[in-house]
C-alpha cells in the first residue's frame, strides 16, 4: 500500500486499540501456570467442589492398543437430532456400517423424560431391526453432550439440561438407567453393556485407534474442552480406586477447561469486549475461557471491535449500519473467510457489503488485521492450556522428554486458515521438552464412542474389571 502518512497514522491508532488482545510468551507461561493450579484443585479430594476447572473423572482407564474388534452400536445425543450408528472395528479400520439421523420434536424436548427416552428407544429399535441386528446384544457407546457427573463408565447423572431441552424427571437421574428402562419397556430388542462418552473423550479415542500414542483429546469449535490420561494416584476425588505402589494406572480426565477464569483467574487479560460478550450471554460469569476462544463468541468479539473503531472514526468513515450494530450478525465463519490468503480481500469486501458497510482499501486492511488479532489470541490461549496438559503428563511420568499425540476436532481448528499452525507453533514454544503430534478426529461422537466401548470390553476381558 506504500508509505501513506495518513494510513500509517490510522494503523498506529488501530494498533493501540488492539494491544489489549496481544499476549506475549511470558504472559502465556503465566496463564499456563495458573491453569496448572486449577487442575490440582479440580483433582483434589477436598477442593474439587469449589474448582472453576472441574476435572471430571470419566472412568475410561485405557486407550486403544490395536487389538480391539467387534460390532458396536453408538448413540449420539447432543441437540435437536440424534444419531444411531452401527460400527465395525477390526485391526485395519473403524467402519460405519450404517447410520441414521432421528429428529426430536420440539414438544418432546420440553416434555417428560420418559417420553424422550421412549422415543430414543423406538428409533434405536427401528435401526436395530433394519440392520438385522435384532438377535444380537451389541455393546453401545452413548455420547450424551449435556453436563453430567459420571459415577462409573456406565452410570452418569444429568446435572442440568442445556440447548433448549428441559424434560422433567431427568435432572439428578442416571441417564444410562433411563435408556435401559425405556428399551426394557419395549421388550422387542436388547443391548449389551453401555459406556457413557463425553465428545472430547470420543475425539481422543477415535484418534487413538489410528495413533496409539494419542492420550489427549481437544475440541475447538462452537465450544472448547480437552481431556487427557492422568495418573490414577493423582485423582484424589474418586473413591475406591486405590493404586498399589509401583502401579501405573491411569484415568481419562474431562478437564472442562472452558470454565477456567470463572473465579477471576483471567481478570487481568479480559478486555472490555470480552466483558460485554459475557454480560450479554445467556450464562454471565460462566465459561470465561471458552468465551475468549471458541466459535460461539469470536465473531461477536470482532463485531464489538468493529463498532468501537467505527465510532472512533477509524473505520468506514465513521458510519455504522443497522446490521453491524445488531449482536450476532458477524458470524465466526466470516473470520476464516476474511483471513484466507488468496480470496481474503475479496471475501472481506463482500461480507462488509452484506452488512451494509461501504469500505475502502484501508478499511479492508484494518478489518483483516482485527480478525487476525482476535483469532491469534484464541490460538495462543488454547496453546497455553494445551501446554499445561502436555507438561503435566511429562512431569507425572518423570520424563526428560515426552512424545505424545493430540486428537483434535472442531470447526475453528479445522476451518480457520492459520489457527492450527499458530496453536501448534506456540504450544511447542511453551512445552519445549515435548514432541507433540496433532491428528484431526474422524467422528469422535460416533466412532469414538464405539472405541470407548471396545476398549472397556478389552480391559474387562484382561483383568475382570467390572463393566
Image (cartoon, rainbow, N blue to C red):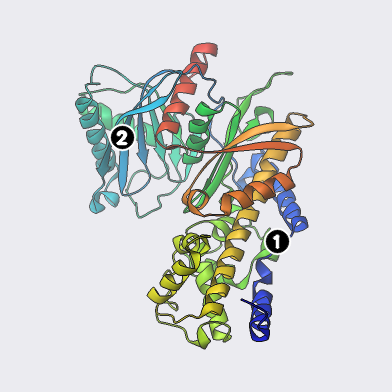
If the image is split into quadrants, where does the N terminus sit?
A: bottom right
Q: Residue at x 35, y 55 (%)?
A: 164
**Residue farthest to the front, as pictured:** 2
Q: Residue at x 44, y 37 (%)?
A: 442
Residue identified by numbered label 1: 23
Using the image, tell me which numbered label, if any, was put on residue 383. none
Residue identified by numbered label 2: 84
Is residue 369 or residue 464 the one in the foreground? 369
Report if the CB atoms under discs 2 and 1 are less than 8 Å apart: no
On screen, 213 above or below 438? above
Q: How many labels does the image show?
A: 2
Residue 69, by quadrant, is top left
Residue 51 visible (yes or no): no
Other residues around mark 2 within 10 Å, as few (<14) / some (14–19) / many (≥20): many
Q: Nearer the viewer, mark 2 or mark 1?
A: 1
**Residue farthest to the right, as pictured:** 400
On screen, 58 above or below 297? above
For this view, does 254 lie left or right of residue 388? Answer: left
Decide which of tag 2 and tag 1 comes sooner along the chain.
1
Tell me the CA gap for discs 2 and 1.
43 Å
The percent position of residue 416, horizontal first and vertical second, equals 51, 55
Is residue 190 or residue 462 the one in the foreground? 462
The percent position of residue 233, horizontal first and vertical second, equals 69, 28
- Secondary structure of the residue carrying numbered label 2: strand
Residue 449, by quadrant, is top left
Amino acid at each position: 500500500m506504500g508509505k501513506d502518512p495518513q494510513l500509517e497514522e490510522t494503523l498506529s491508532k488501530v494498533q493501540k486499540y488492539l494491544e489489549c488482545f496481544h499476549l506475549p510468551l511470558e504472559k502465556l507461561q503465566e496463564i499456563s501456570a495458573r491453569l496448572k493450579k486449577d487442575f490440582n484443585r479440580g483433582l483434589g479430594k477436598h477442593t474439587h467442589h469449589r474448582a472453576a476447572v472441574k476435572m471430571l473423572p470419566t472412568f475410561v482407564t485405557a486407550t486403544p492398543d490395536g487389538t480391539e474388534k467387534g460390532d458396536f452400536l453408538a448413540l449420539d445425543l447432543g441437540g435437536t437430532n440424534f444419531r444411531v450408528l452401527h460400527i465395525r472395528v477390526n485391526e485395519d479400520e473403524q467402519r460405519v456400517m450404517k447410520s441414521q439421523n432421528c429428529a426430536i420434536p420440539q414438544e418432546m424436548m420440553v416434555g417428560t423424560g420418559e417420553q424422550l427416552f421412549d422415543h430414543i428407544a423406538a428409533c434405536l429399535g427401528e435401526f436395530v431391526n433394519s440392520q438385522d441386528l435384532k438377535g444380537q446384544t451389541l455393546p453401545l457407546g452413548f455420547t450424551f453432550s449435556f453436563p453430567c457427573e459420571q459415577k462409573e463408565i456406565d452410570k452418569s447423572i444429568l446435572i442440568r439440561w442445556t440447548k433448549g431441552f428441559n424434560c422433567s424427571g431427568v435432572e439428578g437421574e442416571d441417564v444410562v438407567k433411563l435408556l435401559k428402562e425405556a428399551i426394557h419397556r419395549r421388550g422387542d430388542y436388547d443391548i449389551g453393556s453401555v459406556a457413557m462418552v463425553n465428545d472430547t473423550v470420543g475425539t481422543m479415542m477415535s484418534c487413538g485407534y489410528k495413533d496409539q500414542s494419542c492420550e489427549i483429546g481437544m475440541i475447538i469449535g462452537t465450544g472448547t474442552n480437552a481431556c487427557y490420561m492422568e495418573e490414577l494416584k493423582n485423582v484424589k476425588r474418586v473413591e475406591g480406586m486405590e493404586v498399589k505402589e509401583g502401579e501405573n494406572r491411569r484415568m481419562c480426565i474431562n478437564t472442562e477447561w472452558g470454565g477456567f477464569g470463572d473465579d477471576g483467574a483471567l481478570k487481568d487479560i479480559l478486555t472490555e469486549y470480552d466483558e460485554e460478550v459475557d454480560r450479554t450471554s445467556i450464562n454471565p460469569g460462566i465459561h470465561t475461557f471458552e468465551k475468549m476462544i471458541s466459535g460461539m463468541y469470536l465473531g461477536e468479539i470482532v463485531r464489538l471491535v468493529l463498532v468501537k473503531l467505527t465510532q472512533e472514526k477509524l473505520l468506514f468513515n465513521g458510519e455504522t449500519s443497522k446490521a453491524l450494530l445488531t449482536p450476532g450478525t458477524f458470524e465466526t465463519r466470516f473470520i476464516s473467510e476474511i483471513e484466507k490468503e488468496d480470496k481474503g480481500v475479496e471475501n472481506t469486501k463482500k461480507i462488509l457489503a452484506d452488512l451494509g458497510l461501504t469500505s475502502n482499501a484501508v478499511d479492508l486492511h484494518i478489518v483483516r488485521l482485527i480478525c487476525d488479532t482476535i483469532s491469534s489470541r484464541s490460538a495462543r490461549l488454547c496453546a497455553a492450556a494445551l501446554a499445561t496438559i502436555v507438561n503435566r503428563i511429562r512431569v507425572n511420568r518423570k520424563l526428560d522428554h515426552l512424545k505424545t499425540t493430540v486428537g483434535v476436532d472442531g470447526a475453528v481448528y479445522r476451518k480457520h486458515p492459520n489457527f492450527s499452525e499458530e496453536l501448534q507453533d506456540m504450544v511447542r514454544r511453551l512445552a519445549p521438552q515435548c514432541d507433540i503430534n496433532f491428528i484431526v478426529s474422524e467422528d469422535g461422537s460416533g466412532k469414538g464412542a464405539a472405541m470407548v466401548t471396545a476398549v472397556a470390553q478389552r480391559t474387562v476381558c484382561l483383568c475382570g474389571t467390572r463393566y
